[in-house]
Image: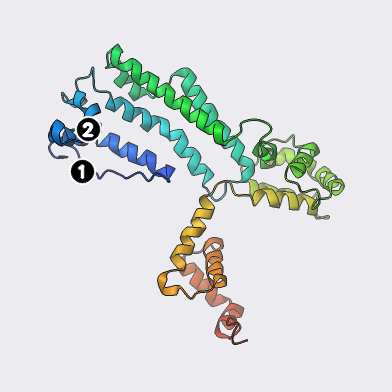
Amino acid sequence: MSEFVDQDYAPLLRHVGTRWLSLLPAVTRLSECWPSVKAYFLSLGPDDCPNIVWKYLKDCENGDEGDGESCILPAYLSFFKNTLVPFHSTIQILEKDMTTTPELYSYMHQLYSKLHQRHDDKFFGEQTEEYLSQLNDNKSSPVITDFLLFYSNAIKYLEKWFQFSDKNLFKKIECLSLTDPNLSYSNLKGIVTSLSLKTDINLDDLYEEFSSIKQVLSVIASDPSNVGEKWMKVINSSNVSSNTPANLIKLVSFVLSMPVCNAYVERIFSLMKNYWRDDRYQASVKLIRCEIQIKLNFKYSCQEFHKYILRNRRLLEAAKSNKKYSFKS
């Protein structure tokens, strides 16, 4: 069929319902292969083509893109190809290893604002506008209504699962991203209260520790480093190096250890499944845990890790001894 429509062959991609990142590539590939896909289903005819497909495809029988005044599918494909980009890029950022909880609210609010802006401007993408201009008014009006409804539903979905207000915990801890030099003690105290950490953190000492780093914040705010590296620079700065800010370290460590999304947890379960195979069913929980810790915390390649092991004499001696076997010790 690809040869018939003079198009290079490319397999369609499958979208997995629980994997958001598979949606944009699948839609993009379908859009690129549209002439071949359209030709295939049209060749089946109304009797053999699935009813739901033929319902929308029957108006596209004439020309490469249909008759120009009735075929609406290219407009929908182009719209989703354009609109899914901010969703895709946001999820990619949130699933990065270096993304931290203080950055979460900012990224979510950016997506929220983009959707509002697109809805208010009735922006559907330049190519989508071209397809809409080819449709008559009776066809284009319902399509535009569908596009605006998509934006509205997406916004409502975000509002249902994420609170876009100052009451949101992630909004309160946003200041720990150190992008604003105006971080105050009241911000830190509010975070301690919201996280119920008053029994673990001495607020009087926290104030003194914050006072010692306040001058560093204006410089750190413009630093391009990630959040974790910024805090390392703050803690290791000359102003505080003589007196370790224990309470500040507790607070920052607690916040930065909070997962941004469930991607990391799912990655753990995926690794666990690979290591705890049927042929290793007698492996202990401790062994699997150690293997996963090594896999996640060592950034070496296999060759680099092999060299590291050979240089570590203590580790080699421990591996040769019986200490690793609890039943032999």
Element type where label 1 sits in the image = loop
Element type where label 2 sits in the image = helix
Residue 30 rendering spot, x and y as whole percentages: 28, 37
Q: Looking at the image, can residue 167 be seen?
A: yes
Q: 186 or 163: which is nearer to us?
A: 163
Read off the residue under disc 1. 9
Compared across the picture, whether 33 is left or right of 24 comes to: left
Q: Which kind of residue does numbered mark 1 sit on?
A: Tyr
Residue 326 rendering spot, x and y as whole percentages: 60, 82
> Which comes sooner in the sequence, label 2 or label 1?
1
Q: Which kind of residue does numbered mark 2 sit on?
A: Asn
Q: Quadrant of residue 170?
A: top right
- Res. 51 mark: 2
Q: Residue at x 27, y 17 (%)?
A: 134
Task: State the residue lying farthest toward the top.
Answer: 137
Residue 37 rendering spot, x and y as whole percentages: 21, 36
Q: Quadrant of residue 320?
A: bottom right
